[in-house]
Image (spheres, helix red, strand yellow):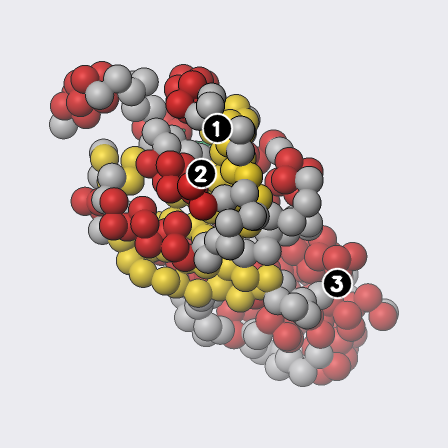
Protein backbone atom coordinates (compact mmCIF):
# COMPACT_ATOMS: atom_id res chain seq x y z
CA UNK A 1 0.00 0.00 0.00
CA UNK A 2 2.71 2.45 1.07
CA UNK A 3 4.84 1.63 -1.98
CA UNK A 4 1.76 2.04 -4.23
CA UNK A 5 1.40 5.52 -2.80
CA UNK A 6 5.08 6.25 -3.38
CA UNK A 7 4.89 5.09 -6.99
CA UNK A 8 1.73 7.17 -7.57
CA UNK A 9 3.41 10.28 -6.10
CA UNK A 10 6.48 9.87 -8.27
CA UNK A 11 4.41 9.32 -11.42
CA UNK A 12 2.48 12.50 -10.67
CA UNK A 13 5.75 14.40 -10.22
CA UNK A 14 5.23 15.04 -6.49
CA UNK A 15 7.97 14.79 -3.83
CA UNK A 16 7.86 11.59 -1.74
CA UNK A 17 5.04 11.50 0.82
CA UNK A 18 6.28 12.04 4.39
CA UNK A 19 3.86 10.36 6.75
CA UNK A 20 5.87 11.63 9.72
CA UNK A 21 4.67 15.12 8.70
CA UNK A 22 1.04 14.01 8.70
CA UNK A 23 0.86 14.09 4.92
CA UNK A 24 -2.59 12.89 3.88
CA UNK A 25 -3.60 14.85 0.84
CA UNK A 26 -7.23 15.70 0.28
CA UNK A 27 -8.20 14.66 -3.21
CA UNK A 28 -12.01 15.00 -3.16
CA UNK A 29 -12.74 18.13 -5.20
CA UNK A 30 -16.23 18.58 -3.80
CA UNK A 31 -14.93 18.59 -0.22
CA UNK A 32 -12.08 20.94 -1.13
CA UNK A 33 -14.68 23.32 -2.57
CA UNK A 34 -16.81 23.10 0.57
CA UNK A 35 -13.81 23.94 2.78
CA UNK A 36 -12.98 27.00 0.67
CA UNK A 37 -16.67 28.03 0.71
CA UNK A 38 -16.79 27.74 4.52
CA UNK A 39 -14.33 30.63 4.79
CA UNK A 40 -16.86 33.03 3.18
CA UNK A 41 -14.10 34.99 1.48
CA UNK A 42 -14.99 38.40 0.15
CA UNK A 43 -12.10 38.61 -2.31
CA UNK A 44 -9.84 41.15 -0.66
CA UNK A 45 -8.81 39.35 2.50
CA UNK A 46 -5.45 37.98 3.62
CA UNK A 47 -5.68 34.21 3.99
CA UNK A 48 -3.13 32.13 5.88
CA UNK A 49 -3.12 28.46 4.93
CA UNK A 50 -1.47 25.93 7.24
CA UNK A 51 0.13 22.96 5.46
CA UNK A 52 -0.76 23.52 1.79
CA UNK A 53 0.87 20.21 0.83
CA UNK A 54 0.44 19.64 -2.90
CA UNK A 55 -1.70 22.75 -3.23
CA UNK A 56 -5.15 21.24 -3.81
CA UNK A 57 -6.86 23.72 -1.48
CA UNK A 58 -4.28 26.40 -2.21
CA UNK A 59 -5.38 26.52 -5.86
CA UNK A 60 -8.94 27.39 -4.80
CA UNK A 61 -7.82 29.90 -2.19
CA UNK A 62 -5.46 31.69 -4.59
CA UNK A 63 -8.49 32.46 -6.76
CA UNK A 64 -10.56 33.82 -3.88
CA UNK A 65 -8.07 35.57 -1.56
CA UNK A 66 -6.74 39.09 -1.84
CA UNK A 67 -3.46 37.77 -0.54
CA UNK A 68 -2.59 34.16 0.32
CA UNK A 69 0.27 33.09 2.58
CA UNK A 70 0.78 29.32 2.58
CA UNK A 71 2.94 27.92 5.41
CA UNK A 72 4.54 24.58 4.55
CA UNK A 73 7.22 22.79 6.55
CA UNK A 74 8.25 20.23 3.91
CA UNK A 75 11.07 21.84 1.94
CA UNK A 76 10.39 19.90 -1.27
CA UNK A 77 6.67 20.73 -1.23
CA UNK A 78 7.37 24.39 -0.44
CA UNK A 79 9.76 24.55 -3.41
CA UNK A 80 7.19 22.90 -5.68
CA UNK A 81 4.50 25.35 -4.60
CA UNK A 82 6.80 28.34 -5.02
CA UNK A 83 7.38 27.33 -8.57
CA UNK A 84 3.70 26.74 -9.21
CA UNK A 85 2.68 30.18 -7.94
CA UNK A 86 5.73 32.11 -9.17
CA UNK A 87 3.54 34.16 -11.51
CA UNK A 88 0.86 34.93 -8.95
CA UNK A 89 1.81 38.06 -7.10
CA UNK A 90 -0.87 37.50 -4.44
CA UNK A 91 0.56 34.14 -3.27
CA UNK A 92 3.49 33.79 -0.88
CA UNK A 93 4.82 30.37 0.15
CA UNK A 94 6.53 30.46 3.55
CA UNK A 95 8.71 27.45 4.32
CA UNK A 96 8.32 27.22 8.09
CA UNK A 97 7.05 25.25 11.06
CA UNK A 98 3.67 26.83 11.69
CA UNK A 99 4.21 26.54 15.46
CA UNK A 100 7.33 28.68 15.18
CA UNK A 101 5.77 31.62 13.35
CA UNK A 102 3.57 34.36 14.72
CA UNK A 103 0.50 34.14 12.52
CA UNK A 104 -0.53 37.73 13.27
CA UNK A 105 2.93 39.07 12.42
CA UNK A 106 3.08 37.08 9.22
CA UNK A 107 -0.33 38.40 8.14
CA UNK A 108 0.58 41.97 9.21
CA UNK A 109 -3.10 42.93 9.41
CA UNK A 110 -6.51 41.26 9.59
CA UNK A 111 -6.54 37.69 8.31
CA UNK A 112 -8.50 34.49 8.07
CA UNK A 113 -6.99 31.10 8.70
CA UNK A 114 -7.53 27.75 7.01
CA UNK A 115 -5.82 24.41 7.10
CA UNK A 116 -6.13 20.74 6.46
CA UNK A 117 -3.78 20.45 9.39
CA UNK A 118 -1.18 17.76 10.09
CA UNK A 119 -2.87 15.54 12.69
CA UNK A 120 0.26 14.90 14.78
CA UNK A 121 0.10 18.54 15.95
CA UNK A 122 -3.59 19.46 15.65
CA UNK A 123 -4.07 20.54 19.27
CA UNK A 124 -0.84 22.61 19.43
CA UNK A 125 -1.92 24.35 16.21
CA UNK A 126 -5.36 25.15 17.62
CA UNK A 127 -3.78 26.61 20.77
CA UNK A 128 -1.16 28.48 18.72
CA UNK A 129 -3.93 30.07 16.65
CA UNK A 130 -5.59 31.39 19.82
CA UNK A 131 -2.66 33.72 20.47
CA UNK A 132 -3.70 37.30 19.59
CA UNK A 133 -3.93 38.88 17.12
CA UNK A 134 -6.31 36.07 16.16
CA UNK A 135 -7.81 35.33 12.78
CA UNK A 136 -11.22 36.87 12.03
CA UNK A 137 -12.35 33.28 11.46
CA UNK A 138 -10.66 29.93 11.01
CA UNK A 139 -11.68 26.77 9.19
CA UNK A 140 -9.82 23.55 9.96
CA UNK A 141 -10.00 19.99 8.78
CA UNK A 142 -9.23 17.93 11.89
CA UNK A 143 -9.67 14.42 13.30
CA UNK A 144 -13.36 13.84 14.14
CA UNK A 145 -12.38 13.26 17.77
CA UNK A 146 -10.82 16.76 17.96
CA UNK A 147 -13.94 18.27 16.40
CA UNK A 148 -15.99 16.55 19.11
CA UNK A 149 -13.71 17.98 21.80
CA UNK A 150 -14.07 21.49 20.38
CA UNK A 151 -17.88 21.50 20.57
CA UNK A 152 -18.31 19.34 23.70
CA UNK A 153 -20.62 20.28 26.57
CA UNK A 154 -19.69 20.09 30.27
CA UNK A 155 -20.01 16.61 31.74
CA UNK A 156 -19.01 14.61 28.67
CA UNK A 157 -15.74 12.76 28.22
CA UNK A 158 -14.74 14.97 25.27
CA UNK A 159 -15.09 18.14 27.35
CA UNK A 160 -11.64 19.33 28.37
CA UNK A 161 -8.92 21.97 28.30
CA UNK A 162 -9.26 22.49 24.54
CA UNK A 163 -13.04 23.03 24.78
CA UNK A 164 -12.74 25.53 27.62
CA UNK A 165 -9.78 27.51 26.29
CA UNK A 166 -11.38 27.89 22.88
CA UNK A 167 -14.84 28.50 24.36
CA UNK A 168 -13.57 31.46 26.42
CA UNK A 169 -12.64 33.43 23.31
CA UNK A 170 -14.42 31.86 20.35
CA UNK A 171 -17.37 29.85 19.09
CA UNK A 172 -16.61 26.46 17.56
CA UNK A 173 -18.95 24.65 15.18
CA UNK A 174 -18.68 21.40 13.27
CA UNK A 175 -19.60 21.95 9.63
CA UNK A 176 -19.43 18.46 8.09
CA UNK A 177 -17.68 15.11 8.30
CA UNK A 178 -14.99 13.92 5.89
CA UNK A 179 -14.43 10.18 5.32
CA UNK A 180 -10.87 8.84 5.30
CA UNK A 181 -11.33 7.78 1.66
CA UNK A 182 -11.29 11.45 0.63
CA UNK A 183 -7.52 11.52 1.31
CA UNK A 184 -4.50 9.99 -0.35
CA UNK A 185 -3.08 8.13 1.48
CA UNK A 186 -6.15 7.69 3.72
CA UNK A 187 -5.59 8.42 7.44
CA UNK A 188 -6.61 5.82 10.03
CA UNK A 189 -9.22 8.15 11.52
CA UNK A 190 -12.34 9.92 10.31
CA UNK A 191 -12.20 13.69 9.96
CA UNK A 192 -14.43 16.74 10.19
CA UNK A 193 -14.37 20.37 9.15
CA UNK A 194 -14.78 22.91 11.94
CA UNK A 195 -15.09 26.67 11.97
CA UNK A 196 -13.87 28.83 14.84
CA UNK A 197 -15.13 32.38 15.11
CA UNK A 198 -13.79 34.73 17.79
CA UNK A 199 -16.43 36.10 20.16
CA UNK A 200 -17.14 39.81 19.73
CA UNK A 201 -16.87 39.95 23.53
CA UNK A 202 -14.48 37.28 24.79
CA UNK A 203 -15.20 35.97 28.29
CA UNK A 204 -11.62 36.78 29.34
CA UNK A 205 -9.35 39.73 28.62
CA UNK A 206 -6.06 39.38 26.77
CA UNK A 207 -4.15 39.71 30.07
CA UNK A 208 -6.20 36.90 31.58
CA UNK A 209 -5.55 34.46 28.72
CA UNK A 210 -2.27 33.08 30.05
CA UNK A 211 -3.35 32.56 33.70
CA UNK A 212 -6.68 31.17 32.41
CA UNK A 213 -4.86 28.60 30.32
CA UNK A 214 -2.66 27.66 33.29
CA UNK A 215 -5.74 27.21 35.50
CA UNK A 216 -7.67 25.19 32.94
CA UNK A 217 -4.74 22.93 32.00
CA UNK A 218 -3.97 22.44 35.69
CA UNK A 219 -7.58 21.56 36.51
CA UNK A 220 -7.98 19.08 33.65
CA UNK A 221 -4.61 17.60 34.60
CA UNK A 222 -6.55 16.52 37.73
CA UNK A 223 -9.70 15.58 35.86
CA UNK A 224 -10.79 12.85 38.29
CA UNK A 225 -10.21 14.97 41.40
CA UNK A 226 -12.81 17.09 43.17
CA UNK A 227 -12.54 20.85 42.79
CA UNK A 228 -11.67 21.32 46.46
CA UNK A 229 -8.54 19.23 45.92
CA UNK A 230 -7.87 20.94 42.60
CA UNK A 231 -7.87 24.51 43.93
CA UNK A 232 -6.00 23.54 47.09
CA UNK A 233 -3.31 22.10 44.92
CA UNK A 234 -3.25 24.86 42.27
CA UNK A 235 -3.36 27.81 44.69
CA UNK A 236 -1.81 26.27 47.84
CA UNK A 237 -4.96 26.80 49.97
CA UNK A 238 -6.32 25.11 53.07
CA UNK A 239 -9.75 23.45 52.88
CA UNK A 240 -11.67 26.46 54.27
CA UNK A 241 -9.98 28.88 51.87
CA UNK A 242 -10.65 26.52 48.97
CA UNK A 243 -14.34 26.22 49.85
CA UNK A 244 -14.71 30.00 50.16
CA UNK A 245 -13.08 30.54 46.77
CA UNK A 246 -15.27 27.91 45.13
CA UNK A 247 -18.45 29.25 46.76
CA UNK A 248 -17.69 32.73 45.43
CA UNK A 249 -17.33 31.26 41.94
CA UNK A 250 -20.57 29.25 42.25
CA UNK A 251 -18.77 25.89 42.23
CA UNK A 252 -19.55 22.90 44.45
CA UNK A 253 -16.39 21.68 46.25
CA UNK A 254 -17.19 18.07 45.27
CA UNK A 255 -17.60 18.86 41.55
CA UNK A 256 -14.99 17.59 39.12
CA UNK A 257 -13.37 19.92 36.56
CA UNK A 258 -15.22 18.24 33.69
CA UNK A 259 -18.63 19.53 34.84
CA UNK A 260 -17.61 23.19 35.14
CA UNK A 261 -18.85 25.65 32.53
CA UNK A 262 -16.46 28.08 30.86
CA UNK A 263 -18.09 30.86 32.91
CA UNK A 264 -17.33 29.02 36.16
CA UNK A 265 -13.66 28.69 35.21
CA UNK A 266 -13.60 32.45 34.49
CA UNK A 267 -15.24 33.20 37.86
CA UNK A 268 -12.70 30.96 39.58
CA UNK A 269 -9.77 32.72 37.92
CA UNK A 270 -11.10 36.12 38.95
CA UNK A 271 -11.83 34.97 42.48
CA UNK A 272 -8.30 33.57 42.82
CA UNK A 273 -6.89 36.86 41.51
CA UNK A 274 -8.67 38.81 44.28
CA UNK A 275 -7.20 36.77 47.08
N1 LIG B 1 -3.52 20.95 2.54
C1 LIG B 1 -3.05 19.76 1.85
C2 LIG B 1 -4.25 18.94 1.40
O1 LIG B 1 -5.36 19.27 1.83
O2 LIG B 1 -4.08 18.03 0.63
C3 LIG B 1 -2.13 18.94 2.73
C4 LIG B 1 -2.66 18.51 4.06
S1 LIG B 1 -1.64 17.41 4.98
C5 LIG B 1 -2.85 16.72 6.06
C6 LIG B 1 -0.76 18.45 6.15
C7 LIG B 1 0.33 19.33 5.54
O3 LIG B 1 0.97 20.03 6.61
C8 LIG B 1 1.44 18.58 4.81
O4 LIG B 1 1.70 19.19 3.59
C9 LIG B 1 2.65 18.68 5.76
O5 LIG B 1 3.90 18.66 5.09
C10 LIG B 1 2.38 20.02 6.41
N2 LIG B 1 3.03 20.17 7.72
C11 LIG B 1 3.37 19.20 8.60
N3 LIG B 1 3.93 19.73 9.70
C12 LIG B 1 3.92 21.07 9.53
C13 LIG B 1 4.36 22.17 10.32
N4 LIG B 1 4.90 21.98 11.53
N5 LIG B 1 4.23 23.43 9.81
C14 LIG B 1 3.66 23.64 8.59
N6 LIG B 1 3.24 22.62 7.79
C15 LIG B 1 3.35 21.37 8.25
Q: How many numbered marks are there? A: 3
Q: Residue at x 68, y 45 (%)?
A: 109
Specify the quarter for ligand 1: top left
Q: Quadrant of the N terminus?
A: top left
**Tags 2 and 1 touching, CB below 8 Å:** yes
Task: Say whether disc 3 or disc 1 marks the residue closer to the N-terminus.
Answer: 1
For residue 62, the mark is 2
Give the distance between the C-alpha atoms of the residues marked 3 and 1, in whole angstroms: 39 Å
Q: Quadrant of the C terminus?
A: bottom right
Give the distance between the C-alpha atoms of the residues marked 2 and 1, in whole angstroms: 8 Å
Q: Is residue 241 above or below residue 67?
A: below
Residue for badge 1: 88
Q: Residue at x 57, y 74 (%)?
A: 261
Of the residues tagged 3 and 1, which is closer to the observer? Answer: 1
**Tags 3 and 2 touching, CB below 8 Å:** no
Task: Say whether disc 3 or disc 2 marks the residue closer to the N-terminus.
Answer: 2
Q: Residue furthest right?
A: 275
> Looking at the picture, how far across and down is residue 221, in whole percent?
56, 56
Q: Residues within 10 Å of mark 2 (few under 14, many from 20)?
A: many
Residue for badge 3: 205
Which quadrant holds residue 16?
top left
Of the residues tagged 3 and 2, which is closer to the observer? Answer: 2
Mark 1, secondary structure of its residue: loop
> Looking at the picture, how far across and down is residue 92, in whole percent?
53, 29
Q: Is residue 231 above or below residue 70?
A: below
- Between 213 and 37, the one lying in front of the other is 37
> Looking at the picture, how far across and down is residue 236, in whole percent?
76, 61
Give the distance between the C-alpha atoms of the residues marked 3 and 2, in whole angstroms: 34 Å
Q: Residues within 10 Å of mark 1 (few under 14, many from 20)?
A: few
Task: Say whether disc 2 or disc 1 marks the residue closer to the N-terminus.
Answer: 2
Relative to residue 224, is residue 1 drawn left or right?
left
Amino acid sequence: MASDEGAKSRRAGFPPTRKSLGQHFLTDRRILGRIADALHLKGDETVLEIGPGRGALTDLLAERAGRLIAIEYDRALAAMLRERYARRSNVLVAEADVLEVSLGELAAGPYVLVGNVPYYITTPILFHALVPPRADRAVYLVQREVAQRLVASPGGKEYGALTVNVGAVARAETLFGVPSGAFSPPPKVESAVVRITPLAQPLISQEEERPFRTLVQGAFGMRRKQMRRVVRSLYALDAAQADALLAAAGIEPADRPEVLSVGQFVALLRGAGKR
